[in-house]
Image (spheres, rainbow, N blue to C red):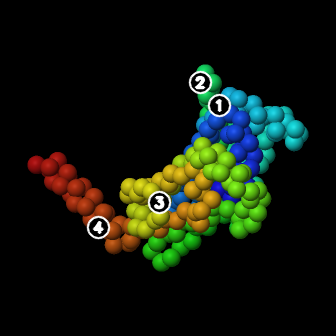
Amino acid sequence: MKKLLLLIPVLLAVVLISGCLNVAMYTKVDKSGNISNLKMEINTTSYVYNLMAQNIQSEGYSSMKEYILSNYTKSLDGSTAGNTVDYSEEWSGDHVKMIIDLKGSIVPSADSGIKISRDGDFLLYEMSMGDDDSSGQMPSSSEFANMSDAMLSAITFDYYLEMPGKIVDSNANEIKGNKAEWHFNGKTMASMDRLYAKSEVPKAPGFGAIVALLAVLCGYGLMAAGRKRD
C-alpha cells in the first residue's frame, strides 16, 4: 500500500483524463504469521490500461506482464523462491481487470509496510498506509487540492484480509469471523494511518486430545469386533 500511495500523482493524472479506477487486494495470513496468498485486482478501462502500458514501455519493459513479474515481489521478502506469481487479464468490452496472484509462504520485508507479529495467543496484522514524507510529493495549492479531492475520490480501494483465527479487534469497516474488510478511496486513504487486525491463533491438538481420539477409535474397533463374534 505504501507503493500505491506513492503512485497517487500518476493515478491522479490518469483519473483526470479518463475516469475512475478500482484496486482490490486480498491477503491471507497463516497461523505461522506468513502470508500464504496475496492477490491484487486492478479494475479500469481499456484507455487507462493503454496509458499505463505506454508508461511501462517507456521504462524499458515490453509488456504489463513483464513489469508486474519483475517488480511485484520486491516489497515482500526479496525472493520468489518457493513462491508462485501469476499475472492474468480479463477483458470485457471496454473494461479490463488485471489480476496479480502470489502464493507460497511470504515473509514481508521491513520496507513493505506490512508487519505481522505474535502477541501471546494472538496474531497482529498491521499495514501502514504510506511513507511519512509522501505528502511532500503533492502540490499544495488550494486549486490543486480541490481538484485532487474529486480525483482522489474516484480511485477506490477494497482490502480483504483473512486471518487464521477469529478476529477480536480491528479498525476494519466490516468483520466476519476471521475475515475483515476495508473500503476507502484515495482521499480518505491520505488521512489513514494503518490497517489493523488482531486474531486468535488456532491451537494444534494437544497430546491429551490425540489420546482421546485414539480411545474413541479403539472403542469403535472393539464394538465392531464384538459384532463379528455375535
Q: Which residue is mark 2?
A: 92
Distance, label 1 to label 3, CA atoms, is 28 Å
Percent x, y of residue 216: 25, 61
Percent x, y of residue 65: 75, 37
Judging from the image, what secondary structure is the residue with disc 3 in? loop
Residue 46, above or below 118: above
- Of marks 4 and 2, which one's residue comes earlier in the chain? 2
- Which amino acid is tagged 3? Ala
Q: Which residue is mark 4?
A: 212
Rendered residue at 40%/62% (across/down): 166
Q: Residues within 10 Å of mark 2 (few under 14, many from 20)?
A: few
- Numbered label attached to residue 74: none
- Of marks 2 and 3, which one's residue comes earlier in the chain? 2
Rendered residue at 65%/51% (across/down): 146
Residue 87, above or below 207: above
Rendered residue at 71%/45% (across/down): 11
Distance, label 2 to label 3, CA atoms, is 31 Å
- Which amino acid is tagged 4? Ala
- Of marks 2 and 1, which one's residue comes earlier in the chain? 1
- Numbered label attached to residue 45: 1
Q: Quadrant of the N terminus?
A: bottom right
- Numbered label attached to residue 172: 3
User: Disc 2 vs disc 3: Cβ atoms closer than 8 Å?
Assistant: no
Q: Quadrant of residue 107?
A: bottom right
In the image, which is nearer the foreground, mark 3 or mark 4?
Answer: 3
